[in-house]
Image: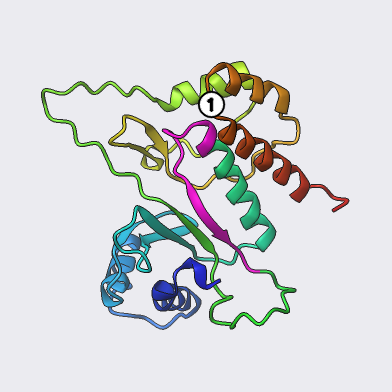
């Protein structure tokens, strides 16, 4: 999976190695995030943040783009990585001011017999859109036109979608476009009973493009295929 950033690979490989060994290092007495910051500095990485499952750094293969790379500490199966990708494609198309776009998602397939080099096949993660924070001045309104509460209302009331997510405030960023973005990774969402006709009707009534409607339909189709036990 060199598409996850070959220029970032040394950092994440050494980070994963650090968590596998018990040897004490000079920064072991530091808070968790500070430990990662030290390692990131040593590898010339732009450290963005970390969570329970991922560490996020700048995408060094395209340093001037709006992309970030989020590496998983532990391996994610290839099938789960695909589900994560299509979940985010679905929600970022339906709510473009509330979910970052995911460009790629990669996991590790233990049965993969391809010619991928072991060191390249030993990382899991995503390449995702970086959300620039809004920095309002004292005179500007703090009104958020695309609030996450709006997303929950539409999902629960109009679409029949129960959106499972981590409610911690650290997982939300108000972007420069006035959108309240959920920047954590979506997972463990039950989409099997979503009604495609209801979702498409909502999109048509709200002037979504035919291209966006097609993306949502294909994403939902792929999600259901990936979780079909007969596949």
Residue 100 belongs to the span the image colors magenta: yes
Write the residue at 18% across / 31% down: 136
| Horizontal arrangement in the rendering, residue 226 relative to residue 75 (left or right) | right
Q: Quadrant of residue 124?
A: bottom right
Inspect this view and state whether residue 48 appears. yes
Relative depth, front residue between 40 and 136? 136
Residue 166 position (above or below residue 124): above
Instruction: Please provide percent x and percent y for residue 190.
Output: 69, 37
Write the residue at 45% across / 23% down: 149
Q: Quadrant of residue 216?
A: top right
Instruction: Please provide percent x and percent y for residue 162.
Output: 62, 28
| Residue range highlighted in magenta | 92-108
Residue 131 position (above or below residue 12): above
Spot the residue most to the front: 210
User: Residue at label 1?
Assistant: 208
Write the residue at 69% across / 21% down: 198
Instruction: Please provide percent x and percent y for residue 215.
Output: 61, 39
């Amino acid at each position: 999976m060199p598409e996850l950033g070959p220029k970032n690979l040394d950092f994440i490989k050494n980070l994963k190695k650090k968590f596998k060994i018990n040897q004490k290092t000079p920064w072991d007495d530091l808070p968790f995030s500070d430990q990662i910051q030290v390692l990131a500095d040593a590898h010339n990485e732009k450290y963005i943040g970390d969570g329970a499952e991922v560490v996020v750094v700048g995408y060094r293969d395209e340093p001037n783009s709006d992309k970030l790379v989020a590496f998983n500490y532990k391996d994610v199966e290839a099938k789960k990585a695909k589900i994560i990708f299509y979940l985010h494609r679905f929600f970022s198309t339906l709510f473009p001011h509330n979910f970052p776009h995911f460009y790629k998602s990669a996991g590790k397939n233990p049965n993969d017999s391809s010619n991928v080099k072991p060191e390249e096949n030993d990382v899991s993660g995503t390449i995702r859109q970086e959300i620039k924070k809004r920095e309002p001045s004292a005179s500007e309104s703090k009104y958020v036109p695309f609030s996450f509460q709006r997303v929950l209302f539409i999902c629960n009331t109009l679409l029949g979608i129960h959106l499972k997510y981590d409610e911690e405030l650290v997982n939300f960023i108000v972007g420069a476009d006035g959108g309240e973005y959920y920047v954590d990774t979506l997972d463990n969402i039950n989409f099997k009973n979503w009604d495609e006709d209801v979702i498409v009707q909502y999109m048509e009534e709200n002037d979504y493009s035919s291209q966006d409607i097609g993306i949502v339909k294909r994403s939902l189709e792929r999600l259901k295929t990936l979780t079909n036990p007969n596949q």
